Amino acid sequence: MMCGRCGLGFVPVALALFSLATFVITYIISRLRNDTSWFPAISDTADHSPESNVFGFLFNMCAAVALLTTFIRYLQLRHDADWNERDRQLLIKLNKVAMLFGVLSSLGACIVANFQEDAVAFVHIIGALMVFLCGIVYSWIQSLISYKMKVCGLITSTLLVLRLLLTIGATVFFIACAAATSYASKDWVRYHASGTTYPQRWDPNDKNYIHHVVGDVSEWLTALMLLGFMASFFGEFRFVKMKIVVSRRTQQSVPLATGMGSDDPLYTSLYV
């Protein structure tokens, strides 16, 4: 399975571009319908129909591509670990742990896509935390693996530094997002509370509005850092190809169907 000279390099690039397209499309729809503020959180762009339906459909596919990217990276590192004889066993273990966090992050993306914030807030937040936290841990582990692979000359110092910067950026922005959003939302709910309901949209005159903006900007930047990290696999994936091999589990002769003549080679080879 190849794409010209880029091998499988198109997969992580497609993940980054497709995810960005999903965010931009839902943002544009929500703004045209006046369903959200001028700079909302990513999830706020998908709180209402039809943008919630568009976001769910597209982001489910993004989650599938993210899972595919994680799987290809796992297989690629399992093969390339042989180049580092001294740390081979460590790299194999780190690769398995990274695969686990990559899968959890992809699962979180699927949860975010299917459980909108306005409908099932708790589940949506759990999914978002899985995306960001597991994605950041995945990036740190992959950065450590990249450092070990640089010793073997399989990646450049520039690529290693880029991944470290993206990982550090994602970590810092996520902490800023969590702190600012928590601080702003607590006071905002109390400020607007009236019975059991309160306004869903922020107003520039609201208390701690600036903290809300800082939280939203940090969330977008965290997502961009993580997508940029995944896209950095392009250089290694472009030398990778995959093929699917189908074989029988045993070498025993295959029985013929009742009524089939043994002189028919087609049925003899296809009947299972």
Image (cartoon, rainbow, N blue to C red):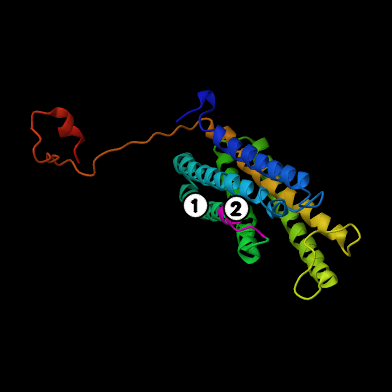
Taking 211 as reference, is 250 left or right? Answer: left
Instruction: Inspect the magenta stretch and tell me whether residue 115 lies in it.
Output: yes
At horizontal 69% and vertical 48% (from top left) the residue drawn is 223
- Name the disc covering residue 113, or none: 2
As helix, strand or loop, the secondary structure at mark 1 comes to helix
Callout 2: few (<14), some (14-19), or many (20+) C-alpha neighbours within 10 Å? many
Q: Using the image, determine if residue 25 lies above or below residue 206.
A: above
The magenta-colored residue range is 109-117
Q: Hey, what amino acid is under mark 2? A: Ala
- Whichever of labels 1 and 2 marks the residue nearer the N terminus, that label is 1
Query: Which x, y percent locates residue 240?
Result: 48, 33
Residue lying at the far right of the rendered structure: 205
At horizontal 67% and vertical 41% (from top left) the residue drawn is 20
Query: Which x, y percent locates residue 78?
Result: 45, 44
- In depth, the one of 24 and 141 nearer the eye is 24
The residue under label 1 is 90
Tell me the CA gap for discs 1 and 2.
Answer: 35 Å
At horizontal 74% and vertical 53% (from top left) the residue drawn is 41
- In depth, the one of 254 and 166 nearer the eye is 254
Number of numbered markers: 2
As helix, strand or loop, the secondary structure at mark 2 comes to helix
- In depth, the one of 28 and 209 nearer the eye is 28
Can residue 84 be seen at all in this image of the molecule? no
Residue lying at the far top of the rendered structure: 4
Q: Give the overall secondary structure of the magenta segment.
A: helix
